[in-house]
Image (cartoon, grey):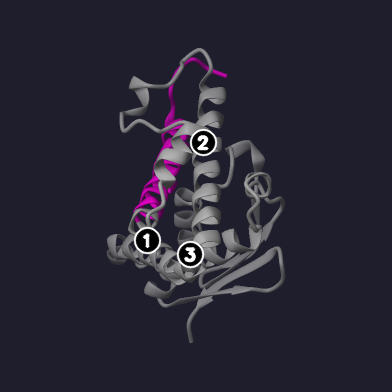
Amino acid sequence: MSAFLGPIHYWLYNKIKLQHEIVEEIFQIGEKHGLSLREECTQAYGSLENKPLEEMIDLSNIHGWLQDKVSLVEYQYAYSITKLLKEKPETIDEIKQILSNKGKKLAETLANQEPNAQKIYQVISDNLLDGMPCDHAYSILSQGENDITLRRNQCVHQNYWDEVGGQIEVYYELRDAWINGLVNEFGFIYKKLDDTTLNISKEV
């Protein structure tokens, strides 16, 4: 791994920060219900400092440092949601609304771009955390101007949810809420063709 930061490192770090922003909102829901999710997650998994990447990253181990931060926010996300739903299962709708709103607000910032299906998928890929770039978690099966079909090659989130006693189905339910919030703003429809095959197409 090069000892110099490149666009791909900032790209991945931005996705780490975006997931951490969602985690912070989950913490806030927990606080309303008397749960100390932030403290528990910090003690168990560490914390992510709010600093520019170049001020924190270990240039002698760029890949390892980024992988560590990916794991940190994945664990915090899985743990905080699992703990919150165990104590307050009724908060699932509030959590889903957070994800949906995040997707919708992102779409609103891109409204002037009038993206096609491929650009919408790129927005998803640029914002949702799916492991490291080398994991190739998703691939494109087919694509056209107003239609794209994707396949999930592997689930890079399963281990985190298993280790905290959570259900991976919850992860995908919340992911779907985020994607629907995004694509619906653009007049597209998101469909799951089966457990691993996804489609985004223009609403008719």
The type of residue carrying mark 3 is Lys
CB contact under 8 Å: marks 1 and 3: no
Quarter of the rendering occupied by the N terminus: top right
With respect to residue 104, does 160 lie above or below?
above
Disc 3 on helix, strand or loop?
Answer: loop
Residue 159: mark:
none
| Residue in view at x 46 percent, y 62 percent | 120
Compared with residue 140, is residue 181 higher up or lower down, i.e. above or below? below
Q: Earlier in the sequence, mark 1 or mark 3?
A: 3
Answer with left or right where residue 55 lies relative to residue 15.
Answer: left
Question: What residue does disc 1 label?
Answer: 102
N-terminal of the pair, mark 3 or mark 2, is: 2
Element type at marker 1?
A: helix
Dot 2, crowdedness within 10 Å: few (<14), some or many (≥20)? many
Quadrant of the rendered image containing residue 30 = bottom left
* Amino acid type at image mark 1: Lys
Mark 2 or 1, closer to the camera: 2
Q: Nearer the viewer, mark 1 or mark 3?
A: 3
**Kind of element beneath mark 2:** helix
> Residue 72: image x %, image y %?
51, 36
Q: CA distance from mark 2 to mark 1?
A: 21 Å
Q: Where is residue 66 drawn, in percent x and y?
A: 51, 29
Segment tinted magenta in the rendering: 1-28
Of circles 3 and 2, which is in front?
3
Which secondary structure is most common in the magenta stretch? helix
Within-10-Å neighbours for mark 3: few <14, some 14–19, many 20+: some
Residue 129 locus on image (x, y percent): 52, 47
Report the disc number at residue 72. Answer: 2
**Which residue is labeled 3 in the image?**
88
Farthest bottom residue in view: 204
